Every structure is written in C-alpha cells, then in structure tokens.
C-alpha cells in the first residue's frame, strides 16, 4: 500500500462510492473504494494506515460484521460508519466495538472530513501505541524463563524474600535476577516496571 | 098387532141407534178432554147424535102402532129431536167450516123454532091435525103400520122452507170455504156439505112426498141423519189421524231439533265459540257455557246486563253497549271487538257477532249471536302487522284488477307516498308510462299461472315515484289467496339502497387496502429510507465535491459534466422511489386493467430490495413462460405480493444465516395464472393452516392479523383464490390463482 494515510470506502452502491471518492479527493485525501466487505478484506494490508468509511447495510457481509473480522485481526484502522437511518442500538454496539464515528446519510462533507481527520489521528496514536508496546514486548522477550517468573512476582508487589520463598531459592539469587530484569527492561524502579508490564498486558503472579 | 115381521127392521134401526149413541159417547168423551172452543164441534156431534137416536126410537114405535092416537102423539114428540138434530148440524157447520153467514144460520134456526111452536100449538102435530085409521104397508120385507084418514096441518108448509133455509146456509158456507180454502179445507167442505145435502135432500123429499100422499111410507128420518153422523165420524176420525200424524211429525222435528242443537253445540265448542242472546226489555243476557267461560262468568246462564258489561274492560264498555243497543233498534248486524279482563288481570280480546232474530211471538226482538276469544288471533294479527309495518322490504298486495289492497310503509317510502296513500289506488300509478298498457295482460297471465317469480330477473325494474321521478327497484312476486280471492304479493327492494351499500363496501375495502398498504410500507420504512438516502447521499457528496474543487479552482469542465450527470441520475433514482411509494400510498377506487404478474413481482422486489438485504433474505424468481396477463388492480396485486413476501421473510426471521424465498409465476390448466411464494421457515402448524386467512388470526408477536385476510379479500374481489400449504421439504407456500384477462381487441 502507498505510504501515508488512506481512506478506505466500502459501499455497495456505486454512485455513492463514486461521490464519496470525489468529495474526499477534492479534500486532497487518498481514497481506495470497494463495493463489498469481502472485496476490501481481500485487498486489506494490515500495515496500511488511515481509516475505513463503511456502509452499515450491505448485501453479503455487512458493516458490523466486517468490524468484527477486522477487530479479530488486530486492525488499527478506525471505522467511520455510514448508515441510512440512525438505529441507536446498532450505533451503540458499533461504538462499543471501537467505531470512530457513526454518520447518518446523507453525509455532510465537512462532517465526514472531520471524522476522517479524527480517525487518522486515532490511527496514528494506535500505531504509536502499538510500536511502544512492541518495544516492551521485545524487552520482555529477552528475559529468561526464570527472570520472567521473578518479574511477575515483582510486579505483584512481593519482597525479594517472599519471591525467593515462592520460587524455592535464596534471597541472594533473587537479587541477581531482579537486577537483570531491571536492566533488560530498561527501568530504574519497580513502579516503572509495573507501568510497562501493565501496558504490555503482563499479569502479576498470584 | 098390525105390524108383521118387523124384527129385521128393529134390528136395523137398533144398529143405527147404536151407531148414533156410540158416536155421541165418543164425541162427548172427546169434548170432555177439550172443553174449549176447539172442542165445540165434538159437543155438537154429541148432541146431534143422541137426538138422531131418539128420532130413530120414535120411528120404530111408529112402525108398530096400536092406535092412530098413539102415532099422532109420537110424531108430535119426534119433532123436538129433529129440531135439535137440525140446529145442531147447522151449528156444527158454523163451527167446523167457519164460513157460514150468521143471518142465514139465524133464518134456518128461526124457521125450525117456528115449526116447533106450530108443532105444539096445533092439534095433533106439525104434520097432521088428525088421523082416523091404521093400516099396514110393506117395508123391506116387513109390514109396518101407517096412519090413515089424515088431515094435513097447514103449518106443515113451513117444513120445506126450513129445509131450504138450512140448505142455502150450508151451501153458502161450503161454497165460500171451497173458494178460498186449501185442499184439506175443500175436502172438509165436500164431506160436511155433501153429507148434509144428502141428509136434507133425503129427509126433505121423503117428508114432502108423504105429506101430500104421493109416497106411502112410514116416518123415516134416521137414515138421512145417519149420512151426516157417518160423515162427521169420518171427518173427526180423519182429524184424529191428522193430529196423530202431526204429533209424530212434531216428535220427529223435536228429535231433529235436538240433534241440530247438539250439532250446533259441538260446532260452537269446537270452534271455541259461545252463543249469547240479549233481551233488551229484561236487561238480561243468556249465555252458553262457552260464552260464560270466555267472559269469565259462572253459571247460571242468565246474566243481568250489568254483570255482563262489568266483565268488559272499562275502555270498551260504553262502545259495546252502544253497539248492542243500536243493533237492537236498527236491526243491523253487530260486529264488535271488546276486551275482557281475565282472572290474572290480563286483557283478552273477545269478538261479538250478532243480529236481531225476528220472533212473531216476542214483542222486543232479542239480539242473538256468537262470541269468541280472539286474543291469540289478534296478537298474531298484531305481530304480522308489526312485521309488515317494520319490514325493510316494501310489500304491496295487488288484486287481479290492479287495485292495491295494502302497501306497507317501506313500499310507500320507496315510491315517495305518505302512509296509507297507496291503498285503494291502482298499481299502474307506480309503473312507467311505457309499461302501463301491457301490465294488465302481464298481470292476467301471472294470476293464471300462479307461483313465484322475480320480475325481469337480474335486471333493474323502473318504478315511478309520486313526485314523478324514477326509482330502481328489485321486485319479486308471489301469488297468495286472501279471503279466497287470488292476490299478488310484491316484495319491493330499493336497488339504489343496495347499490349504495355495495359502493360503500367497495369503498371500505379500498380504504382498508390503503391503510394496510400504509402499514406495510411502515414495516419497510427503514429500508425505504435507505433507498432514498443512497441517491441523496451521492447527490450531496457530488455537489460538495464540486463546490470544493471549484473553490480550489480545480474543477475541470469534463469532471463537472460527469458530476452533474451523476446528480441527475441519482435524483431520478430518488424520484422513482418516491413515485413507487406514492403509488402504493395512493388511496382511491381500484382500477381494473391488464396486469402482468411478473412485472408486479419485479416492482415489489425493487421496493423491498433494501429490506431484503437487511433481513439477509435472497429472493429467487421463477418466471415460467406463457403466463397470461390478468385483469386486476395493479396496486392491490402489488400489495398482495408484498404482503406474501414480507410474511415469508418474517417466517424465516429466526433462522441463522442466509435464507432464500422463491417467488414465481406459472400458467396452470384453465389458462389461469398462478403466483407462488415459497419460504424456508418453520411452516404452519396443521391445525392453524385453515385459519391463516381469518381476520385477527396471527402467529406473529407483532401483527394485527389483517394482512392475509386482506390478501384474500383482494384476490377474491379479483375473482381468484388464495391458499396456503406446507412444503414437503419444510416451510410454507402461499399462492393465488387468477383468471386470465379477456383477450384484447
């Protein structure tokens, strides 16, 4: 995919697709459009950035189903939903699942552009978040199994002595592991370690 | 002893005397049993007959005289008896024939009285002054004594005069009765008059001949009188016989009368009719047992007027009394109805009929008649009357002559007449001018044929209203009999009213169809909004893109053309959606035209496309070739197809994943068009299969249950049928069949 954020438009109605392409093109945005969810998925590149402008009602796979599929694949593209009529339960469900916005047709171009800009920003943040997390995960991956165990105990707020007891070794050994963990994770305090682990989703040992 | 061999004569005279005495005894006996004027003739015969017997005795003595002096004395004493017999006979004629002239009778009696005086005043007797010798003459084989040397009495000339007066009297009386009398009276005249004529003729002739010495005969009067006695005996016996006959006849009559009375009683009882008689002079009523019962009275049968009228309800009392009294004086017929209060306090209707019965003996003629409880009949009459009066169908009763005997209010209203105005008028009044001439012969034919028929079946009949306007009616005729006279009963239904109703029904059906379409479109509103929003979205976006590009100065003319072309196309698309909606929402009368069912299906699918996507239902169409066009209302048929498709979708709403509905058309035997909708839902429970087209029958949680009934109404209005069935492979099939439209041209 081309560099820079792209607006992916998915709508089964050709005339609508074409008109949206035009209005987004006029705003200087990069647009790629698809006539069905399936067509989009076929062409989908996880690395691409930007946002998805998605019609809720489509034959075959509809907008909400596509949202599910993309979420399962860890897609970072925020979704701006377009709908014929604002069905509240449907929009609530979509928003819960992380929809960027929910616009009712016919759509005002400024409103759509604003939503798309927000979505781009959201995408950028998500990318950043994702790269930060990737760094932490790289560091975590460098830990040995023993060090990982010690880390999980540490972020549980346990003292060296307790950790040594739990792991069936002496306090001195734990102290060595601890130092290595701190070093490998590039943190200076346990508090910092806890924040990183939280971001990475590492659970403390029970 | 001068006389010889007189024994046989004595025997004959004895017999005659016996006859006379027997007659006397018999008649006196009869007179004793009837001692009034009607028995007087018995008394007279009872007097005449012994007098004749006495004369007979004297005659025997005269035939066996010992001396002339004895004969003179016997003749003298014979005469009073003759007078008694003669006067008695005259009186008998007077009594028996009843036509004698009194002065003639008086003359005859006076002559006899004068002779009697002369008889005793003279020396000797009325016949002879003296007799000097005795000799014998032969009589009936014997020799009897006769006086000789006789000196005639000059007064004897009176004797024929007396006889003549008598004969004249009897002849006159007989003649008068003969002239005026009937057969019986003539016979009586003949017997009595005839016998007396014989008597007088015999005795008068014999006496005169002897008087002047022409005939030498003894004094013989008895046989002459015997004619009279025998005749009278015969007469009286005949009378007795007649009386016996009369009494027999009377008895028979009485038996007949008894039978007649019993029959009358049975008849009146069976008919529930009581007999009454009013004696105005005595202010009394005589009532039969049934009459008493009807009036709620107890025996005896004679009831005072006041008690009778007490039984009549107060409101009818005076009128009934008046009616009865008027009939009593006018001798007209009584025909009155009155109410009688019964024991339970209810009112019963009683009808009284009667007339004056002229009886020769009665001075104030009584009023007689019958009465009966007619409550049931009157109630039935009233019920019938109420029915006829309240009937929503006009009823007119017409005689053969065309005379209207009866017309109920509805009939009068249909033809614009006031109450009672039609009765007595001619039926021609209600017919259009063109029909009037022929109607009499139509009527005659119908009366001759009898039976029932509708006039010009299947066609509207024109009638003429009072105001001259025409009215369209449906008339059925039936011939009935009223009082043994054939009349025609015509039922008149105002067609205008029926057509109004039909129009109203059609209007309601169309209105319901319209409302139902609106409801259907409500169900589709979500997807219809989508249908509209898509082009609007495209239009808006295109316009804003053009604006943007124009602002940036990047709007190439070619691009603008392209954008405008798209806007035009999308605007059209939106317009079409709206047009389809407006078509379906249009209200109004159904319009029948040639319709292609395939086109109907496609139109509906276009309308439903978004909805079908929403419902994840795909529709497969199966259009067989050669399906005939049908005659129908495009919108209503679209409505039916829409309804069936929506039902099919809803039947599959609970199914996970994609579902398919098959909608198809085909031609079936009879060149009918069949449209079917097959779903993959759960089908219809067998027990509910027969009821799905019933109103308010629904299997859906939300649904009025009016969709399918309306489909049926529409299809049946199109002359088709609609059915539902379950598929062997699951799901249900709804289908309707319509006749092909008539060939064009």
Image (spheres, grey):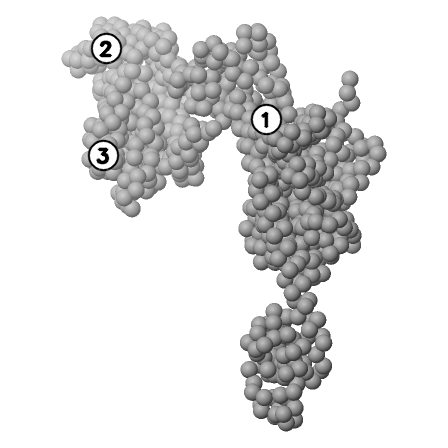
Q: Are marks 2 and 3 on the same chain?
A: yes
Label 2: few (<14), some or many (≥20) within 10 Å? Answer: few
- Work out whether mark 1 precedes mark 2 in sequence or the reverse, and give the earlier one: 2
Residue at left 60%, top 23%?
B454
Task: Residue B185: give x, y in percent of width and height.
Answer: 38, 16
Give the CA distance from mark 1 to mark 2. Answer: 116 Å
Question: Comparing marks 3 and 1, which lies closer to the viewer?
Answer: 1
The answer to which of B496 and B302 lies nearer the viewer is B496
Q: Chain of mark 3?
A: B
Give the CA distance from mark 3 to mark 1. Answer: 65 Å
Say whether marks 2 and 3 touch (CB < 8 Å). Answer: no
Q: What SS does tag 1 mark?
A: loop
Residue at left 64%, top 70%?
A200
Task: Residue B661: give x, y in percent of width and height.
Answer: 74, 47
Residue at left 30%, top 32%?
B338
Q: What SS does tag 3 mark?
A: helix
Residue lying farthest to the left in this orientation: B121
Residue tagged 3: B314
Q: Quadrant of the C terminus of chain A?
A: bottom right
Residue tagged 1: B589
Residue tagged 2: B102
Q: What SS does tag 2 mark?
A: helix
Q: Chain of mark 1?
A: B
- Work out whether mark 2 precedes mark 3 in sequence or the reverse, and give the earlier one: 2
Q: Is residue B620 left or right of residue B246?
A: right
Q: Is residue B642 visible?
A: no
């Amino acid at each position: 995919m081309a560099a820079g954020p792209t607006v992916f438009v998915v709508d089964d109605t050709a005339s609508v697709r074409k008109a949206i392409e035009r209005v987004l093109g006029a705003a200087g945005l990069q647009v790629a459009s698809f006539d069905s969810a399936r067509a989009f998925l076929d062409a989908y590149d996880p690395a691409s950035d930007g946002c998805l402008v998605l019609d809720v009602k489509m034959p075959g796979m509809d907008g909400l189903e596509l949202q599910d599929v993309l979420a399962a694949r860890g897609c970072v593209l925020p979704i701006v939903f377009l709908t014929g009529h604002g069905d509240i339960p449907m929009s609530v469900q979509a928003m819960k699942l992380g929809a960027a916005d929910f616009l009712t047709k016919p759509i005002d171009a400024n409103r759509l552009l604003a939503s798309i800009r927000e979505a781009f920003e959201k995408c950028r943040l998500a990318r950043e978040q994702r790269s930060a997390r990737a760094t932490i995960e790289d560091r975590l991956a460098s830990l040995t199994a023993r060090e990982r165990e010690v880390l999980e105990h540490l972020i549980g707020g346990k003292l060296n002595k307790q950790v040594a007891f739990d792991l069936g070794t002496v306090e001195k050994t734990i102290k060595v592991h601890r130092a290595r963990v701190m070093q490998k994770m590039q943190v200076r305090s346990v508090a910092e370690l806890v924040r990183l682990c939280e971001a990475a989703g590492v659970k403390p040992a029970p | 002893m001068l006389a010889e061999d007189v024994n046989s004569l004595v025997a004959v005279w004895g017999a005659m005397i016996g006859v006379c005495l027997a007659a006397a005894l018999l008649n006196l006996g009869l007179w004793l049993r009837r001692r009034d004027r009607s028995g007087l003739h018995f008394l007279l015969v009872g007097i005449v007959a012994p007098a004749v017997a006495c004369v007979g005795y004297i005659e025997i003595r005269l035939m066996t005289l010992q001396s002339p002096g004895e004969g003179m004395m016997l003749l003298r004493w014979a005469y009073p008896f003759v007078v008694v017999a003669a006067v008695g006979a005259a009186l008998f004629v007077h009594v028996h024939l009843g036509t004698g002239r009194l002065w003639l009778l008086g003359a005859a009696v006076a002559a006899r009285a004068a002779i009697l005086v002369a008889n005793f005043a003279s020396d000797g007797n009325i016949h002879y002054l003296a007799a000097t010798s005795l000799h014998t003459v032969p009589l009936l084989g014997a020799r009897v004594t006769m006086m000789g040397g006789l000196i005639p009495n000059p007064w004897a000339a009176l004797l024929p005069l007396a006889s003549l007066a008598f004969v004249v009297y009897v002849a006159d009386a007989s003649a008068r009765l003969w002239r005026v009398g009937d057969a019986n009276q003539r016979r009586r005249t003949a017997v009595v008059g005839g016998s007396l004529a014989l008597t007088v003729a015999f005795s008068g002739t014999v006496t005169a001949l002897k008087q002047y010495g022409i005939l030498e005969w003894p004094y013989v009067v008895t046989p002459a009188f015997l004619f009279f006695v025998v005749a009278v005996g015969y007469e009286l016996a005949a009378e007795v016989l007649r009386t016996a006959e009369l009494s027999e006849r009377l008895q028979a009559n009485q038996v007949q009368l008894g039978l007649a009375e019993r029959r009358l009683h049975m008849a009146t009882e069976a008919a529930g009719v009581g007999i009454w008689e009013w004696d105005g002079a005595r202010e009394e009523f005589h009532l039969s047992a049934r009459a008493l019962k009807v009036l709620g009275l107890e025996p005896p049968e004679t009831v005072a007027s006041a008690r009778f009228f007490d039984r009549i309800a107060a409101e009818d009392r005076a009128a009934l009394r008046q009616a009865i009294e008027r009939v009593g004086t006018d001798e007209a017929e009584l025909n009155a109805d009155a109410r009688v209060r019964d024991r339970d306090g209810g009112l019963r209707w009683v009808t009284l009929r009667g007339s004056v019965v002229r009886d020769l003996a009665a001075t104030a003629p009584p009023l007689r008649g019958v009465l009966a409880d007619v409550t049931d009949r009157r109630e039935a009459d009233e019920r019938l009357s109420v029915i006829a009066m309240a009937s929503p169908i006009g009823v007119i009763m017409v005689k053969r002559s065309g005379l209207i005997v009866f017309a109920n209010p509805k009939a009068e209203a249909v033809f614009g007449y006031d109450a009672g105005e039609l009765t007595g008028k001619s039926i021609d009044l209600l017919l259009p001018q063109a029909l009037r001439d022929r109607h009499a012969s139509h009527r005659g034919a119908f009366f001759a044929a009898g039976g029932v028929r509708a006039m010009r079946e299947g066609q509207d009949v024109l009638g003429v209203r009072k105001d001259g306007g025409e009215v369209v009616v449906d008339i059925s005729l039936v011939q009935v009999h009223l009082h043994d006279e054939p009349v025609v009963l015509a039922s008149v239904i105002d067609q205008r009213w029926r057509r109004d109703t039909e129009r109203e029904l059609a209007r309601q059906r169309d209105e319901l169809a319209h409302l139902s379409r609106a409801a259907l479109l409500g169900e589709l509103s979500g997807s219809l909004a989508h249908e509209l929003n898509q082009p609007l979205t495209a239009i808006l976006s295109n316009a804003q893109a053009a604006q943007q590009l124009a602002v940036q100065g990047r709007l190439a003319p070619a691009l603008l053309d392209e954008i405008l072309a798209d806007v035009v196309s999308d605007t059209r698309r939106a317009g079409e959606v709206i047009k389809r909606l407006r078509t379906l929402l249009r209200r109004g009368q159904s319009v029948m035209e040639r319709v292609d069912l395939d086109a109907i299906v496609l139109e509906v699918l276009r309308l439903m496309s978004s909805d079908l996507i929403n419902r994840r239902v795909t529709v497969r169409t199966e259009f067989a070739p050669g399906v005939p066009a049908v005659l129908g209302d495009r919108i209503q048929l679209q409505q039916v197809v829409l309804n069936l498709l929506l039902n099919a979708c809803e039947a599959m709403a609970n199914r996970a994943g994609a579902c398919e509905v098959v909608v198809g058309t085909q031609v079936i035997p009879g060149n009918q068009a069949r449209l079917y909708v097959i779903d993959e839902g759960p089908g219809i429970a067998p027990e509910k299969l027969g009821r799905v087209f019933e109103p308010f029958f629904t299997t859906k949680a939300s649904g009025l249950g009016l969709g399918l009934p309306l489909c049926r109404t529409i299809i049946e209005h199109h002359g088709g049928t609609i059915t539902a069935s379950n598929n062997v492979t699951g799901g249900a099939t709804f289908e309707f069949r319509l006749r092909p439209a008539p060939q064009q041209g």
